[in-house]
Image: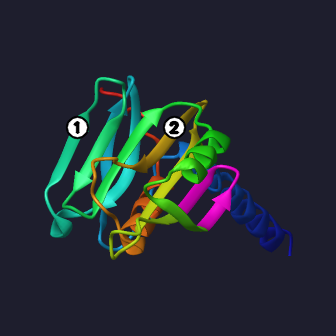
Amino acid sequence: MKKILLLITVCLHLLLLSCGDSKNEESTKLIPGMMELSIKINGNNLLIMVPDSTNGKLNLIEQPWGATEIKVGVNYQLSIEEADGDIALIKSDISGNEVFKLTRYLKDEPSMLFWEAKNENMPDPRFHFYLITKVGELNYVIKETENGDAYNEKSINTMIISANTLKTKSLEKIN
């Protein structure tokens, strides 16, 4: 009986040790249609899941202001930058936009906005997101690129799923 109790205790201990903050661990759950990408932002090694090559060619663009843009085809184009972010300011910008007027918020959370906007002269709405995430001790702002492309709801959902996988990458020791 004591051996069984000891075995259960050891198993529970190992299970608890394996749980942790996924933003700081290297193991990643596989997401169908996505692959893990290693990037460096301001000297910080990070990992993020992005659509695989069946979705288009992967392009990384480092912008002069410090953002890194990740593009895979035309429906996945997101920007990541080390910044504190400001949800209240973004909400103010959204409500003040006279060209693309807010239709609705699909998600309105303390660290993420996902919204639909429409221009009365265009047939289709545009979807946008703005996410603030803490990875390690640093904050990152992740959003779709602002290059004039219109993203549909499905594209933005894919970018949000991807954005939520951002985490630190620990460097392996070289022997």
**Reading the chain from its start, which is encountered first: label 1 or label 2?**
1
Amino acid, disc 2: Tyr
Amino acid at pointer 1: Ile
Name the quarter where the N terminus is drawn.
bottom right
Q: Is residue 94 magenta?
A: no
Q: Identify which residue is drawn at 41% across, 40% down.
A: 80
**Residue 148 horizontal/vertical position (percent):** 28, 52
What secondary structure characterizes most of the magenta part?
strand
Residue 61: mark: 1
For label 1, the crowd category at 10 Å Cα-Cα, with few meaning under 14, some 14 to 19 and many 20 or more, is few
Q: Which residues are magenta?
A: 106-115
Is residue 30 in sight in this rendering?
no
Crowdedness near tag 2: few (<14), some (14–19) or many (≥20) residues, C-alpha within 10 Å: many
Residue 18 or residue 41, whichever sits in front: 41
Label 1 and label 2: CA atoms lie apart by 17 Å
Q: Is residue 104 above or below residue 72?
A: below
